[in-house]
Structures are given as structure tokens and as C-alpha cells.
């Protein structure tokens, strides 16, 4: 949509897949009682920092620098992980300006990936872009097994 949020469409059919023409208004009113529409508060939309945790993984997004968005990924590492991160970034249309890898010398010293990104317009990532990045990173790390919790919690 114009404001960057997704539209949700629900198709209610019979068991045979036929539309419920006669009862669609009554059913849609009843379904609306069960469907919750979430829109972040203005404070969250204007935030400059976001954090998402998934097990040992911690993804931090900091949009306060004019150089670009600084993304820090801690607590997860595997062979080829930087390539996976770069693929996610490219796939979302972002560009990586800088990448630093700290630690990783031993099991007790896990790697920390610190990436500086810019959005398609060359600026810092906005709320929707930051959430998309964190969600996709979490999806790749969890191999498609995400929890059913709202993204703002």
C-alpha cells in the first residue's frame, strides 16, 4: 500500500472451494471480530534502533548514523554465514558499504558481524526495511521455523 503496510485478503469458501455469496457479509462481520490488525505506534515507526532475538541470535539495527544503517549480528555463526547475510541484503535491494567481523578465535569468543548498509535510495533503512531485514535474517538462521510472535515484541 502507499504507507508500506501489507493488505490482507481472506477468502472464505465452502469445503468444495465455492464462494459464500449468500452469507459473505454476515460471515465477514463475524470474522472481523477475530482478526486483529496491527499497526505500530508513531513512536515505533520513528525509532532509530531495533533489536530482534532468536535463540542465541541477536540482530541489532541502528539507523542513527548518517553514513548508513549499522546492523550487528551476534551469537550465531556457521560456514558461509557472511555470504548468506550478503545474499539477504542484496535480495532486499540494500547495499553493503562496510563489513567488520570481530572475534571468532575460539568457541568462547563467537564472531560478531557488523555491517553498514544503505537502502535503495542510498539512505538509512526505514522502519519497514529494518523489520524486513531482521525477519529475513531470522528466517534464514532458523531455517524457516519462526515463532508466531508479533514482530514488535
Image: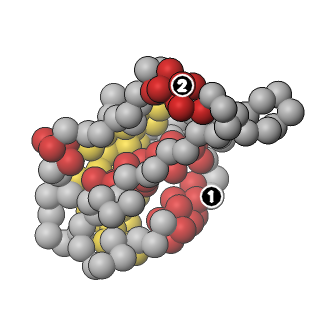
> Looking at the image, which residue sits at the far front?
22
Q: Residue tagged by mark 1? A: 80
Image coords of residue 112 (percent x, y) = 39, 48
Instruction: Examine the image and state in which quarter residue 65 appears.
Output: bottom left
Pick the front one: 63 or 32: 32
Callout 1 secondary element: loop
**Residue 45 position (above or below residue 87):** above
- At 55% across and 45% down in the image, what residue appears? 9
> What's the distance in space between the residues labelled 1 and 2, CA to CA?
53 Å
- At 46% across and 72% down in the image, what residue appears? 93
- At 13% across and 41% down in the image, what residue appears? 43
Q: Is residue 26 left or right of residue 101?
A: right
Label at residue 26: 2
Pick the front one: 96 or 112: 96
Image coords of residue 86 (percent x, y) = 51, 66
Query: Which colour assignment does the render follow?
Result: secondary structure
Callout 2 secondary element: helix
Evaluate whether residue 31 shows in this view.
no
What quarter of the picture does the N terminus occupy? bottom left
**Residue 108 position (above or below residue 30):** below
Instruction: Examine the image and state in which quarter residue 74 appears.
Output: top left
Amino acid at each position: 500500500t502507499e504507507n508500506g503496510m501489507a493488505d490482507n485478503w481472506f477468502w472464505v469458501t465452502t469445503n468444495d472451494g465455492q464462494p459464500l455469496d449468500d452469507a459473505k457479509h454476515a460471515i465477514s462481520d463475524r470474522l472481523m471480530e477475530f482478526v486483529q490488525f496491527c499497526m505500530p505506534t508513531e513512536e515505533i515507526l520513528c525509532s532509530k534502533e531495533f533489536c530482534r532475538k532468536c535463540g542465541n541470535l541477536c540482530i541489532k539495527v541502528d539507523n542513527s548514523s548518517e553514513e548508513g544503517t549499522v546492523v550487528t549480528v551476534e551469537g550465531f555463526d556457521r560456514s558461509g554465514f557472511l555470504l548468506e547475510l550478503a545474499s539477504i541484503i542484496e535480495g532486499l535491494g540494500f547495499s553493503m558499504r562496510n563489513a567488520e567481523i570481530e572475534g571468532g578465535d575460539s568457541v568462547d569468543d563467537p564472531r560478531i558481524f557488523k555491517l553498514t548498509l544503505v537502502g535503495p535510495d542510498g539512505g538509512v533503512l526505514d522502519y519497514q526495511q529494518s523489520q524486513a531485514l531482521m525477519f529475513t535474517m531470522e528466517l534464514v538462521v532458523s531455517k524457516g521455523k519462526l515463532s508466531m510472535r508479533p514482530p514488535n515484541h
